[in-house]
Amino acid sequence: MRTHCVGGGPAGLYTAVALARREPGRPVTVWERNPPGVTHGWGVVFWDDLLDEMHRVDPVSARALRRAAVVWDGQAVQVGHRAPVFLGGSGYAVGRHALLELLGARARALGVEVRSDEPAPADLLDPDGDGLVVAADGAGSAVRQAHARTFRAHVTCGVNRYLWLGTPALFDTFTFGFVDTGAGWIWCHAYRFDADTSTFIVEAPPTTWSALGFDRLDTAACLDTLVELFEPVLHGAPLRIGTGPGTGTAAPWQTFRAVTAERWHHGRIALVGDAAHTTHFAIGSGTRLALGDAAALAEHVAGVDRERLPGALADYGRRRRREIRPWQVEAERSSAWFEDPDAWLDGGDDLALGWSLWQRRSSAPIWRWYVHRASQHGPVRRARVSAAAARRRVRAARRVLATAGEAR
Ligand SMILES: Cc1cc2nc3c(=O)[nH]c(=O)nc-3n(C[C@H](O)[C@H](O)[C@H](O)COP(=O)(O)OP(=O)(O)OC[C@H]3O[C@@H](n4cnc5c(N)ncnc54)[C@H](O)[C@@H]3O)c2cc1C
């Protein structure tokens, strides 16, 4: 059965890869309205669980992702110029450009037709036509909006303003940098994602944002002000806007769109990735979940004829809505933390602030508090970083063993 993916982001491209792997020879077309090399955003984080899952679906793209990614070791919370507080954890980060390039290359190698710079044809909105239509057109999905009643979608906007920026300052430790501007708090989420660039997401409550005039400043003035404010972590390094849409003269501040849909299919159309659901960047998992949707969809529709397609899509939607629910709960809890951090910040106790930030996704057992406190000492911190590196090596070795002999 012919398949059309509307959108060549992570969800659309990986659906194509996963389908081509399960059903070699199946005609699959990916429609992407942006020219090659143009996308919004900078680097995204992920963890070993994603590499494990991708190895099961397609070891070739999993290995390519690992090669394109960098490791970040530990997290740090820094308030102004004060000494940072260390939090544990480690993971990977990859540039969106690199991710899309490697998924696009893999899709083409598997025989998928990837049509860049071409918006999807309008007739794909028809739920009763032939073939399968995968709506992978992102949080603002036009496909979802065209059938909003059937999908029973809800979109709510977060309170804080954010800007997704890049910088040549290299944050090998995932850094939350908080700054008291005098007009309210502002903070960044910063991590390196390739040899010479870090993601630098700036987040501000609306009161700080308007008090500092960000609602009026053009892009250049906005970036200059941010470089000045974030001097404690940037040390004068510049900030850059990306290549995606909305990068004109006004700085592209946004509020996070929380998308949910009660139903993920309509006739031959299936929603995947951000078109179906978003999860706040405070837990850095939207891409991971989008790739998970893609893998699950391919599993449900491979080998299914047009008659049985709606049933297969219903099963896919039920399964994924159930699987992603815990992530959504953590994301809601996490974004709520960032919408009201003042009590922790004004308290002046950075160790308590770090502990609260560590628990923003879910409550931690009390023994973790003692680990947190001990981790502020160099030897314990270094031991935790070494232990995390050892765990990564074990996971990588397991993946190699699991896919030994896999040639394609
Ligand atoms: C600030 C921020 C930080 C984030 N950090 C992380 C992170 O660290 N880790 C993580 O896992 N996730 C992160 N995410 C989430 C992640 O970016 C998204 O979840 C992910 O991009 C979803 O992939 P997608 O393919 O569903 O949508 P998108 O990446 O939005 O791709 C949709 C594609 O569809 C195309 N398109 C739309 N309409 C059409 C059309 N009509 N015809 C053709 N093409 C079309 C668009 O051009 C786009 O390329 C972050 C998000 C934000 C906002």
Image (tube, helix red, strand yellow):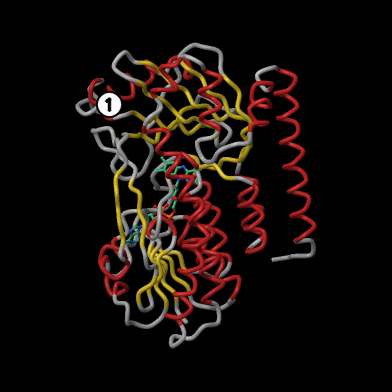
Q: Quadrant of the C terminus?
A: bottom right
Q: Secondary structure at mark 1?
A: helix
Disc 1: which residue:
209
Q: Which residue lies at the image location 61% right of the left edge and 50% below the top edge?
A: 65
Q: Which residue lies at the image location 41% right of the left edge and 70% below the top edge?
A: 270
Farthest residue, direction front: 366
Q: Image quarter for residue 209?
A: top left
Q: Image quarter for residue 120?
A: bottom left
Amino acid identity at mark 1: Trp
Q: Which residue lies at the image location 49% right of the left edge and 71% below the top edge?
A: 316
Closer to us: 142 or 375: 375
Tally the numbered discs. 1
Farthest residue, direction left: 216
Closer to us: 109 or 269: 269
Farthest residue, direction bottom: 307
| Side of 157 relative to 289 (left or right) | left
For label 1, count other residues whose C-alpha is less than 10 Å away and answer few (under 14), some (14-19) or many (20+).
Answer: many
x%, y% of residue 338? 41, 33
**Above or below, 307 relative to 124:** below
| Side of 99 relative to 138 (left or right) | right
**Above or below, 147 relative to 369:** below
**Above or below, 308 relative to 110:** below
x%, y% of residue 247? 30, 38
> Is ligand 1 closer than 8 angstroms to the Cβ of mark 1?
no
x%, y% of residue 89? 63, 35
Q: Which residue lies at the image location 31% right of the left edge and 45% below the top edge?
A: 245
